[in-house]
Amino acid sequence: MEKVDLNDIKWTKLSGLVPVVVQDVDSKDVLMQAFVNEEALRLTIKTGYAHYFSRSRNMIWKKGETSGHTQKIVKILIDCDEDCILYMVKQSGVACHTGEYSCFFREINALE
Amino acid sequence: MEKVDLNDIKWTKLSGLVPVVVQDVDSKDVLMQAFVNEEALRLTIKTGYAHYFSRSRNMIWKKGETSGHTQKIVKILIDCDEDCILYMVKQSGVACHTGEYSCFFREINALE
């Protein structure tokens, strides 16, 4: 698989952040979506565990730091435009703070 | 499955846009990530085909409008915070403008 350098990532569109999609490597369920800055991505790569940047708290956080529900990185992919990242992870416990396995547990109420 | 009203979506964090993750309903591959505003989401719901908002062109676009590579909507989910949407789709042709099936076809070059 072709590789892309960290320096090629388009950090600028969202003031230094890019969206990260998080997928369970086994079930392939989409677990959550968050944002990273370059430092959060470097920490993720270095430690092998998912880190993110919180826009509300304006700080880097490690997933599972308080809950224990960590995400072990299996693979990190990047999209064609270099402005979105995909973490493929082994999820410990559940991904969502509500206790649901995935954050995507509701439909939008306008389909019918 | 519990449902969430369109009005509950947190449009404000990104100046009226929320990220959309797009997943193939059959293979469960993550195909792409884009953004929607409320109108693009309403068009998606109304037509049954994925629409997005282009930040670079500042306009709504229908996926496949020129390429023919449309995305038929099977389900639309929303995350716990109501600030990210997941389209589960039947992809016609390929999702990526490069000709790859998914936009996520490269790894980040810092894992080893």
Image (tube, coloured by chain):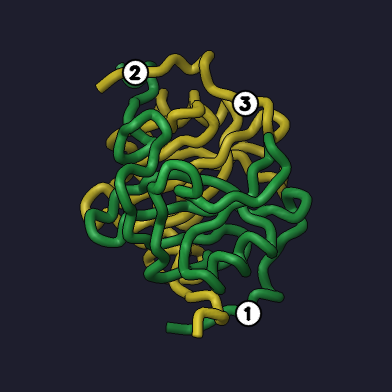
Chain colours: A green, B yellow
Rendered image: mark on residue A17: none
Q: Nearer the viewer, mark 3 or mark 1?
A: 1
Q: Position of residue A89 (x, y in %)?
A: 37, 60
> Alpha carbon of mark 2 to alpha carbon of mark 1: how far?
40 Å
Residue closer to the observer: A56 or B75 = A56
Which residue is label 3 attached to? B11
> Do the residues at discs 3 and 2 belong to one chain?
yes
- Res. A60 visible in picture: yes
Which residue is label 2 attached to? B3
Chain containing the residue with disc 1: A
Which residue is label 1 attached to? A5
Q: Position of residue A25 (x, y in %)?
A: 30, 61
| Residue displayed at 36% across by 48% down | A30
Q: Position of residue B11 (x, y in %)?
A: 62, 26
Give the mark nearest the N terminus, 3 or 2.
Answer: 2
Q: Is residue A47 above or below residue B51?
A: below
Q: Is residue A41 found left or right of B111 in the rendered image?
A: right
